[in-house]
Amino acid sequence: MGQLDQQADDFVFPERSVSADAVQRSRATLMARLEAVDGRRTRRRLVIRMAGMAAAACLILYASFTVLEGRKASVYAGIGEKLEKTLPDGSLVIMNSDTRLRFSKDLPTLPKREVWMNGEAFFKVSRTPDAKPFIVHTEHFDVEVTGTQFNLNSGDDNSSILLTEGSVNLLMPDGRKIRMMPGTYFSTDGSSPDHTINKEEEPVRVEKPAAVLSWLDKNLVFEDMPLSDVARQIELIYRVKVKFGSENVASRRITGILPNENLNILLRAIEATTDFTIVQEKDIVNIQENP
């Protein structure tokens, strides 16, 4: 026991003196490392916080967009179909073949009643107590009304409008505002229902609006019209391609009111009133002169 105690007493732990400068330098190094670590953690937390905020903002925007898109409605009248649609504000739209209409389900509560259309439709716009404007957006101009009736035809190449009641403003892409009165017609290509060209690019008065509105009664009205022009109407309505056997056939003129229940009935009616033979193969319509 005493030997062990003696051995323990023989262990000597040497003392190491450390200068104050060395202690200060070590402290400074340690603090610098701690600050670097803390800075990285802070930046990491900041990045995570910013990413979270961005994700939340995107989520809110997506949710808002989804809600807005969820309040949109789209109506389509198929090939050869005529469709009536009453909008949420009470306005009536009669849609012609191959026509699409888009609008908001919240139409009555919005500052402006806006709809988007491609094709042809007849509008009976309801009035509101505060005269809230009703705007139809087309490919070539916008139609601004408060309460009126008009026929609107809009495609990729041309848009036209016939005003039957009330008044409208056409808002053109170049900033012009064209005022229309009842019984007038305007087309972006300058044509008119009687096939004259309106070089003034102003609304013209229509003496026989039946040629424009005949589709409402499922008819097509042709008055001394070249068959080539008839073919263009058929192509637009039924999305087919019309081919002629000769230039003589294409230039022949026809007059009459033809039924437009469907493409087959229309073609048979044209064939019965002319000296042509018409053969349809899928989406190709061939018009040949009888031998």
Image (cartoon, rainbow, N blue to C red):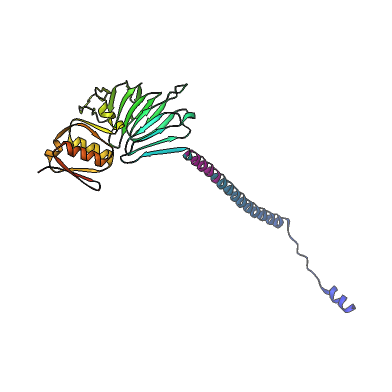
Residue 256 appears anywhere in the view: yes
Q: Is residue 47 magenta?
A: no
Residue 171 appears anywhere in the view: no
Image quarter of residue 141: top left
Give the total of numbered labels: 0
Residue at horizontal 37 percent and vertical 39 percent from the top:
76
Range of the magenta residues? 55-68
Q: How far across and down, in percent of the image, does residue 188 sit?
A: 27, 30
Q: Nearer the viewer, residue 1 or 262?
A: 262
Relative to 127, is 241 on the left or the right? left
Q: How far across and down, in percent of the image, does residue 283 sit?
A: 25, 46
Image quarter of the C terminus:
top left
Q: Residue furthest right?
A: 2
Q: Residue furthest front?
A: 272
Relative to 198, is 133 on the left or the right? right
Q: Nearer the viewer, residue 232 or 12?
A: 232
Q: Is residue 40 above or below residue 109?
A: below
Q: How far across and down, in percent of the image, does residue 201 sit?
A: 26, 25
Magenta part, dominant SS? helix
Q: Nearer the viewer, residue 58 or 45?
A: 58
Q: Residue furthest left?
A: 291
Image quarter of the N terminus:
bottom right
Q: How far across and down, in percent of the image, does residue 63 sit?
A: 52, 42
Q: Is residue 234 above or below residue 281?
A: above
Image quarter of residue 134: top left
Q: Nearer the viewer, residue 278 or 101?
A: 278
Residue at horizontal 47 percent and vertical 27 percent from the top:
111
